[in-house]
Amino acid sequence: MMCSNPDRDAPSRGRAGVVALLRLWTVVLVLACATTARGAEPPSAASIEQDAAALEKRLLAPCCWRESLHSHDSPLAEALRLEIRTRLARGEPAAAIDADLLARYGTKVRLHPSDRDLTILWLAASGVLLVLLILWARRRLRPVGAVAAVSAQDECFETMLDDELARSDG
């Protein structure tokens, strides 16, 4: 006669519960993906053109770095404009395309500096102005006694120099 050991059967019941939970989770994910894919509409041609033009106007053409990608006429600029429109038509967000072009070409591809760059520029300019203001204030607000002491010391050195010159002439 075979006896059943409840301790030995417990792990298999636990595994069965985990497997059932994984199956349920898989079904939920598949249904969520199918619903999202069915509900997503392809972008319209007008929205693609609008997004592409906005993105191209914010970027410099990486072949010469002088004109915006929107107005520049070169093979590289044309290829990038086509790439942007193709990626937008596939449903890729403009921010992702912008980030990818930024990663490929660096911050120099931006037509206008980012807010972070402007913040750093303002902080640096403010720091320089503060240092100049402190130096001006220290010079301007020097105590009168310090100026008099320097003048007295200058007179002393001048007298010593005159005496030295008189001895060497005489």
Image (cartoon, helix red, strand yellow):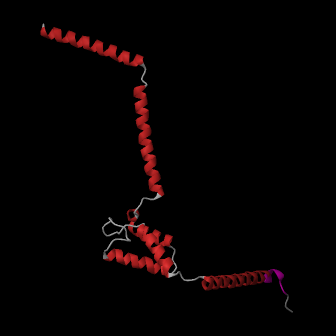
Q: Where, by quadrant of the figure, is residue 24 drawn?
A: bottom right
Q: Position of residue 123 (x, y in %)?
A: 46, 47
Q: Closest to the observer: 48 or 108?
A: 48
Q: Position of residue 128 (x, y in %)?
A: 41, 41
Q: Closest to the observer: 50 or 129?
A: 50
Is residue 100 visible from the viewing direction of this image?
A: no
Up-down: is 68 above or below 28? above
Q: Closest to the observer: 5 or 154?
A: 154
Q: Is residue 66 left or right of residue 133?
A: left
Residue 7 is one of the magenta-drawn residues? yes
- Residue beneath the point at 12% across and 10% down: 169
Up-down: is 148 above or below 38? above
- Residue beneath the point at 20% across and 11% down: 164
Q: Position of residue 130 (x, y in %)?
A: 44, 38
Looking at this view, name the residue that lies furthest to the bottom: 1
Q: What's drawn in magenta, residue-wise?
A: 4-9
Q: Position of residue 45 (x, y in %)?
A: 49, 81
Q: Quadrant of the C terminus?
A: top left
Q: Where, by quadrant of the figure, is residue 70 drawn?
A: bottom left
Looking at this view, name the residue that lies furthest to the left: 170
Up-down: is 11 above or below 70? below
Is residue 142 visible from the viewing direction of this image?
A: yes
- Residue beneath the point at 39% across and 65% down: 109
